[in-house]
Amino acid sequence: MQVHVILPAAGIGTRMAAGTHNVSAPKQFLALGGIPILIHSLRAFAAVPSVTTILVAVRANERERVQAQIDEYELSDRVKVVEGGDSRQQSVTNALHSLKAEADDVVLVHDAVRPLIDTASIERTIEAIARHGAAIVGLPAVDTIKQVDRTVDGAIIATTVPRERIVMAQTPQGAKFSLMKQAFDEAERDDFVGTDEASLLERAGIEVSVVAGSPRNLKITQPADLALAEFYLSQTA
Ligand code: C5P
């Protein structure tokens, strides 16, 4: 059983650019502790011995820049660059098409913009996939969760959702290659677009287990997230 990793990194980061900082680069290329966010993410997976291939999906005009960074940080033995698409799901689909894998191999997908993923969480996810077929990293909800109706006057609470039944989905998310391919093929056939891999697996009737995540594994979406990530990083330096 081999472990393959896909890092979708073809986003253009509009929410980051819309923030108060004057940010021109997509968020996965911004520096965190002096190192590009994407490189942090790649290093985290390259540090896991069972990982054999890492495919990073980027925009066509960024292939050269990313390849140069991969070479500079000496990650080229296991990391390959592929072309991303117009949505996160399309970027992952493109990478899946260029992946040579056996049915039983594990495929993990990780947002390139979650640079502080730790080895233990990655290994827990791989073990859960090997045991159950599909798994994601999730974080229990600490706030009380409300379901709302959106009205012209703003959000109105419809109901309170039992918090113990809620987890917030992080990445990595993954499955055995055959299950992942089935879920993506069915989504493509039905024109279904989801925001994560689990939503595709769920609709294909595949059971997805959840392993414990960490608040440190934050997704860098807005400038304030970068400041928080810098803080977390300084705590481990
Ligand atoms: O924009 P979002 O928060 O969904 O981005 C999550 C991840 O998906 C990021 O790493 C981003 O680079 C990636 N992505 C992609 N292709 C797109 C859009 C987003 O690979 N077209």
Image (cartoon, rainbow, N blue to C red):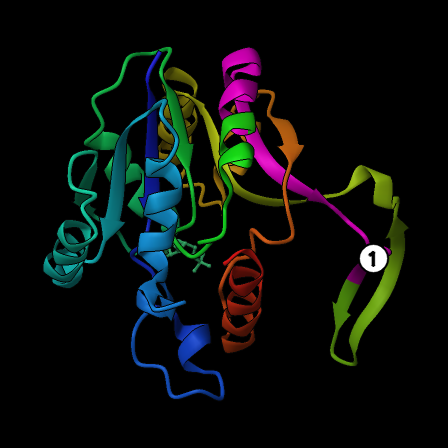
Instruction: Tell me where residue 148 sits by quadrant.
Output: bottom right
Using the image, determine if residue 159 lies above or below residue 205.
below
Image mark count: 1
Rendering coords of residue 103 (x, y %) = 34, 11
Q: Is 145 placed left or right of 120 in the picture? A: right
Task: Please report the residue visible at 77 percent of the width from the left and 42 percent of the height from the top.
Answer: 166
Is residue 87 visible to the viewer in this orientation of the structure? no
Using the image, determine if residue 39 lies above or below residue 149.
above
Rendering coords of residue 127 (x, y %) = 53, 19
Residue ranking furthest to the front: 237
Range shown magenta: 125-148
Q: Is 102 placed left or right of 153 in the picture? A: left
Rendering coords of residue 220 (x, y %) = 49, 63
Task: Please report the residue visible at 56 percent of the width from the left and 51 percent of the height from the top.
Answer: 217
Q: Is 37 placed left or right of 126 in the picture? A: left
Residue that mark 1 sits on? 143
Rendering coords of residue 96 (x, y %) = 28, 32
Residue 138 sits inside the magenta stretch: yes
Quadrant containing ligand 1 reads bottom left
Residue type at the position of mark 1:
Asp
Residue 166 sits inside the magenta stretch: no
Task: Please report the residue visible at 42 percent of the width from the left and 43 percent of the height from the top.
Answer: 110
Task: Please report the residue visible at 48 percent of the width from the left and 83 percent of the height from the top.
Answer: 19
Using the image, determine if residue 226 lies above or below residue 184.
below
